[in-house]
Image (spheres, grey):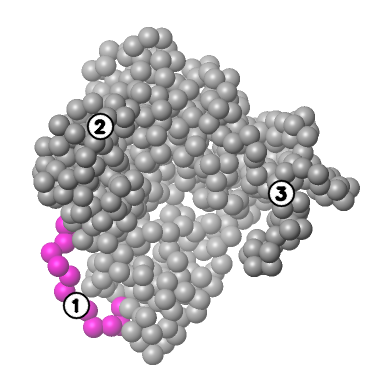
Amino acid sequence: MTAVALSGGDRPVLYDAAHGAAPLVDAIIRYRGLETGALHVPGHAGGRGVGSTLRNLLGSTFLASDVWLTPADATRARREAEALAAKAWGADTALFLLDGSSGGNRAVHLAQQQAFGPGTDHVVIARDSHTSTLAGLVLSGATPHWVIPRIDQAGFGISLGIDPASLDAALSSLGRRAGLVSMVSPGYAGACSDVRSLAAVAHRYDTSLFVDEAWGAHLPFHPDLPQHAIAQGADVAVTSAHKMLAAPSGAAIIMTAGARVDAGRISRTVQMTQTTSPLLPVLASIDDARRTMVSRGRVLLDRTLELASDARRRLAAIPGVRVAEAEDLGVPADRFDPLRLVISVRGLGLTGLELERLLRTPGPGLGTSGLLHPAVAVEGADESNLFVAITTCTSPDVVDALVTALRTVACRPRRRLRPAWDGQLVEALLAPRTQVCTPREAHFAATESVPLERSVGRTSAEPITPYPPGVPSVMPGECLDRDAVTALTRAVASGMHIHGASDPSLSTVCVIRD
């Protein structure tokens, strides 16, 4: 194999000629090229029996690619594709996933239970971890020890990740009983943690570091982006190819490096927790995304970074709009992903959630005579902000539409907002809670539903997760204290979607029966 160094500033990007292949893509193409008569599942037989409405929605090509290879052919192609992915991301091993980074979170936590012997079923976890981490805790039965992330001081309400000193204190208190350190980087808003220092702390206590890098699949492919987790010493990481790369939803990868984690155990756990009937087009999309990024990622990201920079400049010029920059948040520029835009819209007299709804309805919904086509769907919103993801597939026309829409809104008469928390809602939602029992114990306990206002002092039996950013404010097994109830009440009033709770309106909550 020939490796060619492509100029890339301080960090060269390597192109290996072997990356011109895409084994899973090629296997599907070979099958289709033979015009094979399908006497196997899936039952739609290449799309022949699918109704016209679904065919128009999914496309004949996709349906014809949803095929069943022999187990030997599928395994061979998948392993070849995963080996190429491991090289592309600088890992020792890679495993393709169909159920996103969420599936990776569950598998890693389950695989690592007592991995270092009896008594190591304690896990140190960043409090801004995704809600799928909870499923890993319930499955494994591990006892979580939470580390509260830092929140920016510029009023955006952005999690900046955990710091090494806080991690050191948590691990020190456990006395080498932690089987895993679990964290998120980049965060939902693009801020990256100092993974290198955090890895050094974890390794000093003989603990492996797992990074949920769902938002960072693109990081290895351009020198002007933050370094990815594996390159900074993480032992295992999961990333979503469907978030910032050109792959459909659910496409993700688990990567391992070094001997601190048992890659074989993680692989077996993935086999246990994922379907044995994989949707091959999704797996093939990871293969193709890897080939694209290794061969053309630098050029594609050059253009994308320029588009994002232009968007930042134009949005920041709109009265009442602020765009978060690394210096605003107090993080080094090399630990901030510029392709994630956090746009504070409080100065427009609207909450981010209200504005998100307006943006999805073009024309009169903006309250002016100007029309906006097409409607703009942003990644998410909260009380203060819009969250935008700009990828290599983002059209400049859509960025233009967003800028035009916000300029239009800025020309409207302003109205006074109710008293704001100035970004403190996220901090209140992420505050530490008293842990009464493990998430697994709470999950299987006898429960009852009580009104939220009467739940103070009760132990939650369910996760309560405001979106965005999909971080549990209350975990099963934690006490619903007065601060938690106040923060959740405000989250509902602001229009946040509540995930995980049996009653999304939070009129009632599920608690452990006394």
Label 2 Cα neighbours within 10 Å, binned few <14 / some 14-19 / many ≥20 = few
Look at mark 2 in the image and give the residue it sits on: 446
What residue is pinned by disc 1? 415
Which disc, if any, is residue 43? 3
Magenta-drawn stretch contains 309: no
Along the polypeptide, which appears first: circle 1 or circle 2? 1
Amino acid at the residue labelled 1: Arg
Residue at the spot x=40%, y=24% of the render? 140
Residue range highlighted in magenta: 410-424
Label 1 crowd (10 A; few <14 / some 14-19 / many >=20): few
Secondary structure beneath label 1? loop
Q: Which image quadrant: the N terminus?
A: top right
CB under 8 Å between callouts 3 and 2?
A: no
In the image, residue 285 lies at what x, y percent?
66, 47
Q: Nearer the viewer, residue 350 or 97?
A: 97
Residue 135 locus on image (x, y percent): 39, 34
Quadrant location of the C terminus?
top left
